[in-house]
Image (cartoon, helix red, strand yellow):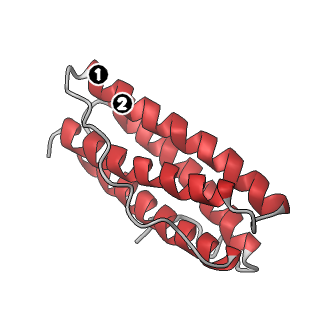
Amino acid sequence: MRDQDVVEGLLRLERRSVAIYEALASSAELRGRAAAAADLFLAHERRHVEALKQALVTMNAAVPAPGSAGEQPAGAPREMIRTAIDHELRCIRSYHSGQVTLKAPTLLAGAAGTMANEAQHLAFLRGLLGEDPVPVAFVTGR
């Protein structure tokens, strides 16, 4: 798999991340630490999108137009947080898998850093639900 293919796949996931955290951040039912985290994580995810777009530009590749953001998280705050947790696990798995195939050192470093950031999100979200924030030493997603 080419670096460009990996980056394009990660960009699709990160655009979905933005949509999920936009829904969480705009939820009137989310309050306190959860609402503050949604705002912060949304800013992180937007930076991830921009970094991936820049990586494609650096490769002289076209930046794909955004597709459908998918179904928005809905329901009670716990359900919305669970949707974000499930998505973070998918992101972590994709970054973990991408590190196996990425060849450019800057892309590999960026993927590792972003994967760690997604794991931080995951730990915080789990804590909001009263779950063990870090049940394993190294998260590889699912």
Which mark, residue 97? none
State the residue position of label 1. 57
Residue 73 locus on image (x, y percent)? 53, 69
* Label 2: element kind: helix
* Label 1: element kind: helix
**Residue 59 as seen in the image, left or right of residue 93:** left
Label 1 environment density (alpha carbons within 10 Å; few <14, some 14–19, many ≥20): few
**Residue 58 as seen in the image, left or right of residue 90:** left
Residue 80 locus on image (x, y percent)? 60, 72
Which mark, residue 53? 2
Q: Identify the residue at image location x=67%, y=72%.
A: 126
Asked if the residues shown at circle 2 and circle 1 are in contact, with their CB atoms under 8 angstroms apart, the answer is yes
- Residue 130 appears in which quarter of the rendering? bottom right
Q: Identify the residue at image location x=49%, y=71%.
A: 86
Q: Is residue 103 above or below residue 74?
A: above
- Residue 37 appears in which quarter of the rendering? bottom right
Q: Nearer the viewer, residue 4 or 39?
A: 39
Residue 131 locus on image (x, y percent)? 71, 80
Q: Identify the residue at image location x=67%, y=66%.
A: 125
Q: Is residue 26 above or below residue 89?
A: above
3D distance between C-alphas at marks 2 and 1: 6 Å
Q: Nearer the viewer, residue 14 or 137?
A: 14
Residue at the extreme right of the image, as rendered: 32
Q: Nearer the viewer, residue 62 or 4?
A: 62
Labels in figure, total: 2
Label 2 environment density (alpha carbons within 10 Å; few <14, some 14–19, many ≥20): some
Q: Amino acid at mark 1?
A: Val
Q: Amino acid at mark 2?
A: Lys
Pick the quarter of the image with the C terminus: bottom left
Q: Identify the residue at image location x=23%, y=23%.
A: 59
